[in-house]
Amino acid sequence: DYVNYPDQSFFKMSLLLTMRWLPQFLVYLIDMSIWYAVWQAFAGTAVGFSENLGDIRTMSDIRKNFSRAPESFCRVMLSPDAGSRRGSMASFMTQSQSSFNSMGEEGQSLLGADPHKLQSYLNRLLDVRVQKWVMFSAAWNEIIDHFRQEDIISNRERDNLKFSRFEGFSQAIYLPVFQTAGVIEDVLSELDAATAEQPSSPLSDEEFFKPITSHNTMCTAVSEVWELGTYLFRKILGPAHQDDVVAMTSLVIKWAQDGTLLQHIHVEKLRSTMNGFIQLISLLENKIGRRKCALKLRRPVSSNSKSMSSALKRVKSTTSISVRSTEITAIRKAESGTKHAIIDALRDQVRDKIRSLVYAVKGLLKSVDVDSESRDVLDRLTFLLSMENGFIWDDSYTSDHLDVLSKDAPFKEVLTMVHGLVACHPKDVEPKSKEVRRRLTFFVNSLFMDMPYAPSIHDMFSWNVMTPYYSEDVTYTKADLQKRNDELGVSTLLYLQTLYRSDWKNFLERLTINDEEKVWSKKNLEQTRIWASIRAQTLSRTVSGMMYYEKALRLLANLERLDESTTKDLMGEKFGYIVSCQVYGNMKKNQDSKADDIEQLMHRYPHLRIAYIDSIRVNRAGAAVSYSVLVKSDGRGGIQEIYRVRLPGNPVLGEGKPENQNHAMIFTRSEFLQTIDMNQEGYFEEALKMRNALQEFAKREGPLPTTILGLREHIFTGSVSSLANYMALQETSFVTLGQRVLAKPLRIRLHYGHPDVFDKLFFITRGGISKSSKGINLSEDIFAGYNNAIRGGQVGFKEYLQVGKGRDVGMSQIYKFEAKLSQGAGEQSLSRDVYRLCYRLDFCRLLSFYFGGIGHYFSNVLTVLTIYCVVYLMAVLAILDLEKIGDRVITPMGTIQMMLGGLGLLQTIPLYATLGVERGWSISLREIIHVFITGGPMHFMFHIQTKAYYMSQTILVGGAKYRATGRGFVTQHTAMDEQFRFFASSHLYLGVELASGLAIMGIFSDAGQYLGRTWSLWLASVSFLASPFWFNPLTFDWNVVVSDYKIFLDWMSGSSGGPQKSWSMWWVDENSYYKKMAFSSKLIYVVKSALYLLVANG
């Protein structure tokens, strides 16, 4: 153009070209971070699939793989000594033999009188495979019991999920109802299909029933329904019919063993018979538990009753069973004058169902005219319906017997299980809680992942858990739970009840509370406080979750047949938990209720240890001596001091959290140390796998030893609000797929926080796990990773074990959290640790380190800088009428708009990949769409500016500091003046500036296509301005708006009282950092001021 238009100034032309190409150049600089996010998604997906993540996503997947679970559980999670061929086998045999001896006549009635049959069942029971099922069932039932204790399942759901054990029955365990529900329907469908396709020549029993006998679950379900169903039938009819029921069931067992079932029954009529049985079971399941029993027996035991019984003698022949009708008639006449009608609706309903079932069974029988055994069964069924003093005709006998059954706990347990087996659809018996389904699917899935084999309890590594605590909530008090929010009028307990509605119902059911006011009674108050506390981010939740490790070790020791005294010794040797409560001593002196709650935790968990700093004045001048102190519960309601170590001075010199951890390190007694934050929780089923995870340190993948083991986290605060859900999704992507890719294949994962496990011996000889210098070590976690990499350690990351973690749930909390991370990243970029590490990394790992770490924050800075430059350049070109060069009209910057608008979209690809691998692609897509519909892009764009602002401010000015984000639920509305103080400098001023620039550009531009050129820039401006108010509760309530506006005007016009009361004082405080700014940093703001002059001049 300079050649074609020689009258143009070369300087002007160069300046215009620079202005036009600058946005493209800046976009080029952030391109790589976009491509890294895309590549990360594909690489993380591939690694996740290779590690079998997400193979089991639903309860249906659990059912399909459940038969493989015991084998995998025993092979991987139990040591070779468990279920050993010596001690475990012997004790198991003794237990089984005793249970069979206790069966007595009942056992023989079910299995037949042949002792060889008993022995065959015993041999099957003692099979190694059955042992594995028994041991797996013990662990599984313990997991389900802990679900119930946590109130995330109801009593009925617990019964449906647990393996069943019934004393005196043939099998050691019975499959959970959720596994076998609906299987009988599948069996009937198989039989219907086989009957329809049966060839002209009859098949043998083995061939006909092969589809069922070859399917483990079907075969087991049929076996359970037969055994438990015949038991129920015999119990329902009572002792008057026991001999007949035993004889009939023995004949059917004989037919099955002889392979002659098809010769004796009509298979095509099984479905109608099963329907009659289901109706009977459903009726009893619904009503037997609510039956009101009579105060005394309706049928007195007397000589008259004996004579009635003796009058009904049966005369058995080869063809029939007849009753002496003359005696029956006499009895009826004798009773007619004395017998009163007994009204019993349930009895009559049960009789009707029994009649229908018996008629259906009679219709099943074949060859009754020629086969004596079939005729015998038919005659016994006929006699059952006509027996005068039996279930069908004797009202007193039947009503009294139903009363007895209503109080028979074993009968009702079997009834509930059989009802689930035959009458429930699989969906009906699945747990309703998403949390339960998530935890169960993850646990079962992890059994098939690459997990090291477990050593014995004696040989396993030892480890301690350490949690730093300052002054957060320990256990909610009654006052905390009843405290109401001013605007919403909602108490904390009501909020939790609404958020966890089903959990609250389960809690009331567990404590058998019908009136909710009784939760405040002296008997239930402590349980209510605990229930609420373990659903918030409290110390109580963290401690109860971490102490699952001890319970898990006890269960594993029990499965491996260790005696109680040995187990007790090993608990103290292999595991310990220390909470570093820095100011516990001050709490005690000030009689803070939190100190009492901490002591209550020590009494509840005897192996819990509390470390704290104790300062004692030694003279009147104020000189004090500091000690590190370790205490525990003495088991008698008091607190016992274990150690007191004198310190050279106050140990808290730098950042509080790392100093808190460092002073407690001397009290850890183990080979490995797991660091757990105060906002985390543990799960019992995951604690079972910790012994396996520690074996990762024994493996050596590559030339360097594994010195840090990273574990995945589950963000449990996602259900609190939309903001909490966005934060949970963002963190989920980072702590799973992001960490997975950094560890494999990039080999540059460091230490990004808890719940990583450290090789303690390695770290205490190389500087410790926490650097605590003020400011520079604001993000103290990452410096342990830097230290580890520089000194020759290697970091592993495994996803077969997870730990829960809470995140911030309110706008201001998230803002402070992102600000803290951004300032920490800024300090890291200035630290000597990063300098040394970068000099030692090869080029490829250096790039991986940059884009996987602090480069993310630099990319955010460049993104906001690009938006800023594009707006001002477009505005300046429009104002100065330089939108065209010569006669050429400007081409709209469509590429820039697409890149800026697409930046947020492309950054969601790792999130989509994370959810897709673990939940399924369609569910993942629905989640992403839901995020977009609810305003997610505004939230993410808002925090791009949060990171950019604090990252650049820290580098230019410094002054990074720890920001306590709080752990509570944010249910209250934030006033407008508070919102302004929070977000004005970082977002609101920039949003107004961008909107003004775009408006000016729209006024002066002649190039057209205004929306096409500016839509992504307007989106950024609106996000910065609207997000704080869009995500604030009650923002659009008119009364609240009026109140906020009045308070805001008072604040703006105030002149004293500090930044909280006066805008002018806030302005001075907010901009005080300019005075400390270096001259080179001030030049950047001079350039910004020059832009204002240029626009004004134009």
Image (cartoon, rainbow, N blue to C red):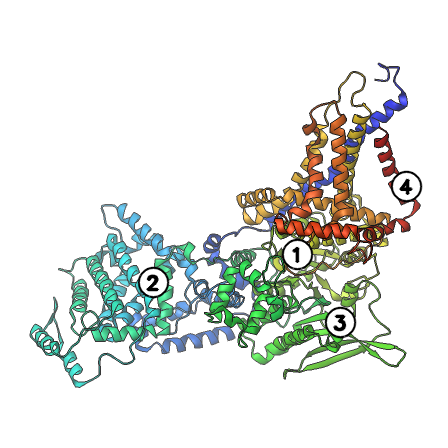
The numbered disc on residue 807 is 1
N-terminal-most mark, 4 or 2: 2
Q: Amino acid at mark 2?
A: Val
Marks 1 and 4 sit apart, C-alpha to C-alpha, by 38 Å
Locate residue 826, reporting x and y percent: 81, 50
Task: Kindly identify which residue carries mark 4.
Answer: 1083
Q: Which circle, 4 or 2, is nearer the viewer?
A: 4
Q: Which residue is mark 3?
A: 583
* Cα–Cα gap, marks 3 and 2: 61 Å
Q: Residue at x 81, y 23 (%)?
A: 882
Number of residues whose C-alpha sits closer than 10 Å to that of mark 2, classed few (under 14), some (14–19) or many (20 or more): some
Q: Residue at x 86, y 26 (%)?
A: 15
Mark 3 vs mark 2: in front: 3
Do the residues under discs 4 and 2 have CB atoms within 8 angstroms?
Answer: no
Mark nearest the camera among 1 and 4 is: 4
| Amino acid at circle 1 | Arg
Number of numbered callouts drawn? 4
The CA span between labels 4 and 2 is 84 Å
| Residue that lies at the very extreme toward the left in this rendered image | 326
Q: Of the residues shown, which amino acid type is indicated by label 3?
A: Val
- Label 4 Cα crowd, 10 Å radius (few <14 / some 14-19 / many 20+): few
Front tag of 1 and 2:
1
Q: Secondary structure at mark 3?
A: loop
**Is disc 3 surrounded by few (<14), some (14 to 19) or many (20+) residues within 10 Å?**
some
Q: CA distance from mark 3 to mark 4?
A: 45 Å
